[in-house]
Structure formats: structure tokens, C-alpha cells
């Protein structure tokens, strides 16, 4: 099965991400689309497994296979967790709606480590730009501030909110290069320190609810197997309980 077919015919969840989901879009902003597809269970019974992710078929579109998406979310991957909390959901079937209902099961205090590690890497890149070019990539600086704010608030409240709300104008001022770099650095340092303090009092559990997520995945895989193509001999031999002819 062609990867693009998996996205076209088997997507269970699709949303808009990037500046439009964050409330930071301007006239020239792209529309970044992210999604989750459910590869039919019989594809996993073959030597060539379905892809864990697919780029496209549209521009600025990226999708994960459901199992890979859940694995990354359980590890508190910032990109994946934010995708699941997008305020701009374009499509969700029954499986997608159940995935949305599981959002809290993925959240834990692990987000402090993963968000902080990602932020540290991005900040080092910005600092290298300042050393080598005299200024950072201001758009990236804006998004790093947004991420740090989101992580701090998540640890404080237990809720992941993407839209920046009334922080829009101060953040766009950073994007336009109107805020001196030392002030941006101080802002980043303060947010990181506030997140560090918040993690010790966070309402989030220490670990995500792996069992609940795994039960969901097993049920979805089983349902997919039972809906398999009636003409597929391998599928019928396994799902139908029949015996396959031995060579």
C-alpha cells in the first residue's frame, strides 16, 4: 500500500499546527497540517511493515502511524503532545475522537525534561546565530518563548494550551526583532526557572497512563483486523480461525 494512500484513506485525526494553532499567524503564515493514520492490521503481518510516518501528500503535511504517535506521546515528545491539543481539529473519526479523549493519559511530569531538553537545544542554536551573525533567527526565538511559556503553564495547571492569547503582541514583537536579544535571553531564563519550580508542585502524575493507552491501541488493532479484506487469504486464515494450507 502506497504511503500516501494510508494518509488519504486511513487518517483518523487531522489538525492544523504551527502559528495558526498558536494564535501567532500573520498574513504570510503557512498552514501546517499534522495527522494520525491507522495502518490496517494485516499490513503488520507481512515482512514489509507500514511506515511509521508519512510526509505529504500535500505541502506542509506530516502524519504519524497511530502506534508511533502514541509511543512518542507517552515519551512526552513536545511536537506530538501539542498536535494532540491543537485547537484547530480538521477531522476526527471514531478512533480519532477516542484518541482526543485520551489526551490526559499521555501527560505527566516527564514534560519538564522533554520540553526543557528541546528548548535547551533550540536556545543553543539561537546563541550560535548571535555569535556568528550578530542576531538570532527572530521567528525561532518567538516560538521558543512560546514553547517555554506553554511548558511552564502545563506544569502549573496540568493543562496544555497552545493559543498564546494576550501574549500574542509581545511575542510578535520578538519575531519582528523589536526586542533586544539580552531581554529575550532574560525572558527565556525566567520561564525556564519558573518551570523548574513548577514541576515540584505540578498536578501532573509522575508517569503517563501507559496501560490505558496500550489497551486503546490493542482494541483498535483488533477491530482493524476484523474488518480486513475478505479476499485476503492470509487475513481470513488468522482472523477467521481457519487453517492455512501448508506447503
Image (spheres, rainbow, N blue to C red):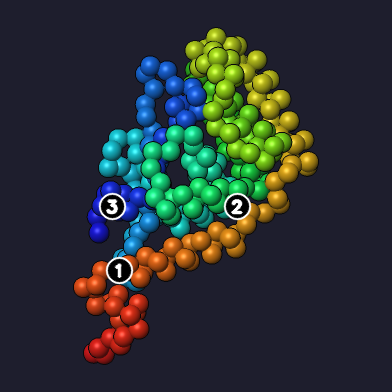
Residue at 56% x, 25% y: name it: 164
* Image quadrant assignment for residue 14: top left
Q: How crowded is mark 1: few (under 14 residues within 10 Å), some or many (20 or more)?
A: some
Q: In this view, does 216 lie above or below 186?
A: below
Extreme residue toward the bottom, this view: 246
Q: Which residue is drawn at 55% across and 9% down?
A: 178
Q: Is mark 2 on a helix, strand or loop?
A: helix
Q: Where is residue 9 in the image (x, y as percent from the top left)?
A: 28, 52
Q: Residue 105 carries which label?
A: 2
For the C terminus, the quadrant is bottom left
Q: In this view, does 108 lie to the left or right of 46?
A: right
Q: Which of marks 3 and 1 is nearer the N terminus?
A: 3
Query: What residue is shown with label 3?
Result: 9
Q: Which residue lies furthest to the top in this view?
A: 178
Q: Residue at the location (39% across, 38% down)?
A: 90
Q: Can residue 29 be seen in this view?
A: yes
Percent coordinates x, y for residue 230 in the rendering: 24, 72
Quick check: 242 above or below 24?
below
- Give the quarter of the figure containing the N terminus: bottom left
Residue shown at the point (30%, 68%) measured from the top left: 228
Question: On the image, numbered disc 1 is attached to which residue?
Answer: 228
* Separation of marks 3 and 1 at Cα, in angstroms: 14 Å
Front-lying residue, 236 or 193:
236
Amino acid at each position: 500500500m502506497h504511503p500516501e494512500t494510508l494518509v488519504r484513506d486511513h487518517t483518523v485525526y487531522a489538525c492544523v499546527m504551527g502559528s495558526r494553532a498558536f494564535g501567532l499567524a500573520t498574513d504570510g503564515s503557512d498552514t501546517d497540517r499534522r495527522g494520525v493514520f491507522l495502518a490496517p492490521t494485516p499490513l503488520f503481518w507481512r515482512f514489509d511493515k507500514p511506515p511509521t510516518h508519512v510526509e505529504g501528500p500535500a505541502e506542509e503535511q506530516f502524519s504519524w502511524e497511530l502506534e508511533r504517535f502514541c509511543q512518542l506521546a507517552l515519551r512526552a515528545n513536545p511536537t506530538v503532545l501539542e498536535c494532540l491539543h491543537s485547537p484547530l481539529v480538521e477531522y476526527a473519526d471514531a478512533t480519532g475522537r477516542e484518541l482526543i479523549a485520551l489526551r490526559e493519559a499521555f501527560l505527566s511530569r516527564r514534560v519538564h525534561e522533554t520540553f526543557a531538553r528541546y528548548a535547551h537545544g533550540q536556545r543553543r542554536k539561537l546563541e550560535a546565530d548571535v555569535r556568528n551573525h550578530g542576531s538570532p533567527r527572530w521567528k525561532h526565538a518567538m516560538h521558543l518563548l512560546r514553547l517555554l511559556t506553554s511548558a511552564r503553564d502545563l506544569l502549573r495547571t496540568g493543562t496544555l494550551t497552545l493559543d498564546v492569547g494576550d501574549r500574542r503582541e509581545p511575542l510578535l514583537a520578538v519575531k519582528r526583532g523589536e526586542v533586544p536579544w539580552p531581554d529575550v535571553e532574560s525572558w527565556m531564563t525566567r520561564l525556564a526557572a519558573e518551570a523548574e519550580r513548577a514541576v515540584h508542585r505540578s498536578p501532573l502524575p509522575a508517569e503517563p497512563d501507559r496501560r490505558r493507552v496500550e489497551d486503546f491501541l490493542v482494541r483498535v488493532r483488533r477491530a482493524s483486523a476484523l474488518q480486513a479484506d475478505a479476499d485476503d487469504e492470509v487475513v481470513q486464515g488468522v482472523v477467521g480461525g481457519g487453517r492455512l494450507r501448508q506447503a
